[in-house]
Image (cartoon, rainbow, N blue to C red):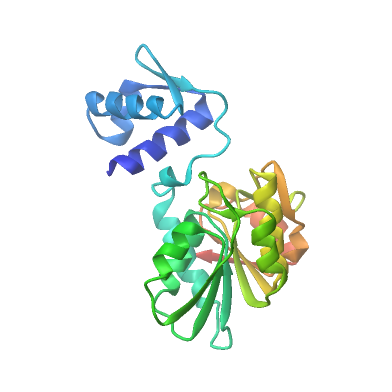
Amino acid sequence: MRQQDRLGLILERLSSRSSVEVADLADELGVSQASVRRDLQLLESQQLLTRTHGGAVASGVLYELPMRYRGGQHHEAKRAIAKCAVSLLGPEVTSVGLNGGSTTTEVARALASHTGLRVVTNALNIAAELAVRSHIELVVCGGSARSESYELVGPLAELTLRNINLDVAVIGVDGVSVAAGLTTHHEVEAQTNRFLLGTAERVVVVADASKIGRRGFARISEIHAVHDLVTDAAAADRDVTALERAGVRVHVAG
């Protein structure tokens, strides 16, 4: 396992448990305790945790993992979700919007082989991946960069989005439920994502099972704005059924 993947998993465990033990992490990750201690030392230097004797505790409350540590979370599920989401885009689709996130990054990679496509994004990492694809017309929003998600947000991004129309917006979220709708951790990011969603004739949400039935701090939109949701087989049946009853077409990636 790559160190970046280990760091993401350590932060995920710390976020859910508030504390972790070196011995437990070493067993779970299949590495030596010395490697785990080095990982904890690196994360502490970035003020993401506080080391203790034999482990670590959360440094504050870890509501949102930095984007650079999310790649190892549910990676295979996200790749399958991306492949399924791209399969929903017929030949009539010529423009696609993507916000930031690890799942939408996988969607961008799956789109990279398509020709005759215009992609609009406010995510710096997605823009960097697609900028080298000469067969894709890339439009990047302006705005203020968020280090947690690599997204450009705020009035400058919204100014761009006010003046375009898209066939499809593929949106990654931190939570999706019938009651709370689409949600994320940050209110300014939610506002910019709301503008992106509003530009599109069709909205496709990509969210692995860990996001289904959950809600973040800031609402992007009500659930009725969503046409399609692509998730993975680990999503709870009750949550999937509730979303379908709300009028969302749910696709479960293999």
Residue in front for this viewpoint, 87 or 220:
220
Instruction: Pinpoint residue 90: horizontal percent, then vertical percent.
Output: 55, 84
**Is 164 in front, or is 15?**
164
Q: Position of residue 159 (x, y in %)?
A: 70, 64
Which residue appears at 51% of the width and 45% of the height?
147
Q: Position of residue 48 (x, y in %)?
A: 46, 29
Residue 123 to residue 130: above or below: above
Q: Which residue is drawn at 67% across and 67% down?
A: 161
> Can residue 176 be seen at all in this image of the molecule?
no
Residue located at (77% from left, 57% from top)? 222
- Percent x, y of residue 89: 55, 79
| 52 in relation to 179, above or below | above
How many numbered discs sit on the rendered protein? 0
- Which residue lies at the image location 57% right of the left edge and 27% below the top edge? 61
Q: Could you tell me which quadrant the N terminus lies in?
A: top left
Q: Looking at this view, is 81 or 3 the one in front?
A: 3
253, above or below 5, in the image: below
Residue 137 is left or right of residue 215, and the answer is: left
User: In this picture, is 63 found above or below 241?
Assistant: above
Tell which residue pokes out farthest to the top in this image.
Answer: 53
